[in-house]
Image: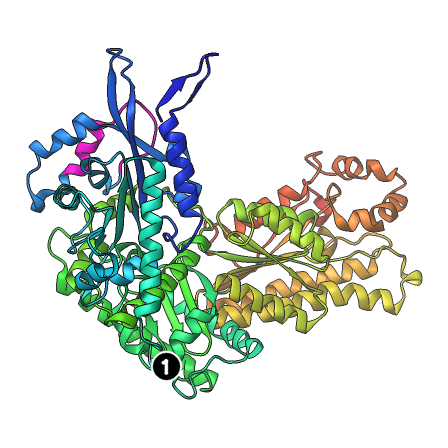
Amino acid sequence: MTTHRDADGPRAPHPAVEALLARSHRLGADPRNTNYAGGNTSAKGTATDPVTGGEIELMWVKGSGGDLGTLRAEGLAALRLDRLRALTGVYPGVEREDEMVAAFDYCLHGKGGAAPSIDTAMHGLVTAPHVDHLHPDSGIALACAADGEALTKECFGERVVWVPWRRPGFQLGLDIAAVQRAHPQAIGCVLGGHGITAWGESAEECERNSLSMIRRAETFLAERGRPEPFGPVVAGFEALPEAERRARAAALAPVVRGLASADRPQVGHFTDAEVVLDFLARAEHPRLARLGTSCPDHFLRTKVRPLVLDLPPGAPLGEAVARLKELHAAYREEYRAYYERHADDASPAMRGADPAIVLVPGVGMFSFGRDKQTARVAGEFYVNAINVMRGAEAVSSYAPIEEAEKFRIEYWELEEAKLRRMPAPKPLATRVALVTGAGSGIGRATALRLAAEGACVVVADVDAGAAAAVAEELGGPDRAVAVTVDVTSEEEIGAAFRSAALAFGGVDLVVNNAGISISKPLLETTAGDWDRQHGIMARGSFLVSREAARLMTEQGMGGDIVYISSKNGVFAGPNNIAYGAAKADQAHQVRLLAAELGGHGIRVNGINPDGVVRGSGIFAGGWGAKRAAVYGVPEEKLGEFYAQRTLLKREVLPEHVAGAVFALTGGDLSHTTGLHIPVDAGVAAAFLR
């Protein structure tokens, strides 16, 4: 980032940088202007060369990656214009234009900032001081219309010029610069199959020109377009009622996620937005979906085309599942054929043949990615594509770029280099965890640890407020969702897993942690005490595990179930009949389920904590006072008392139990099932024999 020194000494962003960031934020805040992480903006200005003391011309441009709406100064690349424009003298031609990206590094001014993007030449070679390159749905609709050039002229007259499709790069920058010189009256251009570029003498004029182009295109499509560009509604393909639709989506989600994860695990996202449901209800959706998306930003995230279920939503669930599996097998064959048609010796290896977008008429759209945000954004991009198709079909016919060009973008070495620069995934990346009793204590610590290791987390607790607070603490809906669950209720447990399926596509890891403790002597323990203790812990764990096993087997991706049992499941202590017996029940469930579910790749293990006082909802709810009375110590000293009776003389904290959950599920113990791990600082009487 380039800065200047204020009168009082501190360094501040260059005024051109401040104006550029403000403009970028305004443009990026409105999805009509550009898609997430799409497009780039730039500003040119002068600064003092720290070596010579003379004035130099610089350009600040949004770097590779990032989003206009949240762009920060460190997301800009700062380049010397004299050196950037001098590259035209060494440009080796379009066949070797990718080499120019590395040359941009030799044009950078100072340290820091982002890596220059492939669009840098577009901004630097255009002489206007301010340039916006955007991907609005309305502009791309004209860019992807069969007669886009004529429509551009009809829409804008001489103020906007058509530039035929060319892959982003140095040559496209030269083409746009030539258009600007040849058409001095123009405020911008429509890039065939791609988007728009606008320019101006000031930041305000550039933004005004960008918005003028976008709004004019919107008005043109609305006024000039024919009604029902996707054709009539097909009887039987209308959207199901909301409750029925979402129930169907939750039933399909684990199956679809399993299919989309055949090559590598994926996280899912679901939307039943009206724009999606309307598209899938109409006659032309199979033809248009088959044509695929067009704008490079779109198909880099959505793949070349979606998988579309060709059954009405009223078809029996079993029939829909069987047909999805058939279509998935065909999709993989077609994708491999697509790769083999266009790949050469220099092409990167095929990255995977599974769909990123799955469309289900009457229900909605499932989208997939390496994490929740990527999956969600893929879905948002397909919504952009639907809007583009609607606009193009309204005034002409949708005509995306040729398949060979799509392949050149999808398997572009520069895109491959971006993938190589990405940080290594965390151990639990792509995994979805559901933790019961996650509003406090061990459950909260476990949710935090699993999220820190890359998992998406469903925070389940009987206390809705506590669950919501933990989910927010974990980072919100792209990282965690809260569900209210009483584990004695089959209906609430089923609803929790359905919520997980709709939020993330399914569940891979379940932690049975919900519990209470009733500390009474045998003769004071009522049948109601016994039933409540066992209802929550023994029966509740059984119900949660049963639902988890059902979903995991449908998903076909294996999974982990972890029971937070207790030292009290193997150690006989006084005044503890209900709690100890319930924990022993949970401990044996681990062994029984490990034996039963191993054939599905589902591992079941347990953890036996002891003396976890700090942060514990159970101890704070009266159990601590009762146990302290049993042992004759003050309640506030109970943790210290438990520590002193251990071999290691250490207090056990919720985070230690969470660490054991991660140890079991993080990958290093992938061949372990039916195991109980003590987390008790060493209690010899509770050693497993």
Magenta stretch: give its range.
100-116
Say whether residue 385 is visible.
no
Viewed as shown, does residue 243 lie left or right of 71? right
* Residue 53 higher or lower than 402, as above or below: above
Viewed as shown, does residue 438 lie left or right of 145? right
Question: Is residue 113 highlighted in magenta?
Answer: yes
* Residue 258 vs residue 29, the one in the foreground: 29
Q: The residue under label 1 is which amino acid type?
A: Arg
Q: Check the picture and name the quadrant holding the N terminus.
A: top left
* Residue 85 vs residue 259, the one in the foreground: 85
Q: Position of residue 277 (x, y in %)?
A: 44, 74
Q: Position of residue 509 (x, y in %)?
A: 53, 59
Q: Secondary structure at mark 1?
A: helix
Q: Which residue is mark 1?
A: 323
**Farthest-out residue, right:** 523
* Residue 493 vs residue 246, the one in the foreground: 246
Q: Position of residue 144 (x, y in %)?
A: 23, 63
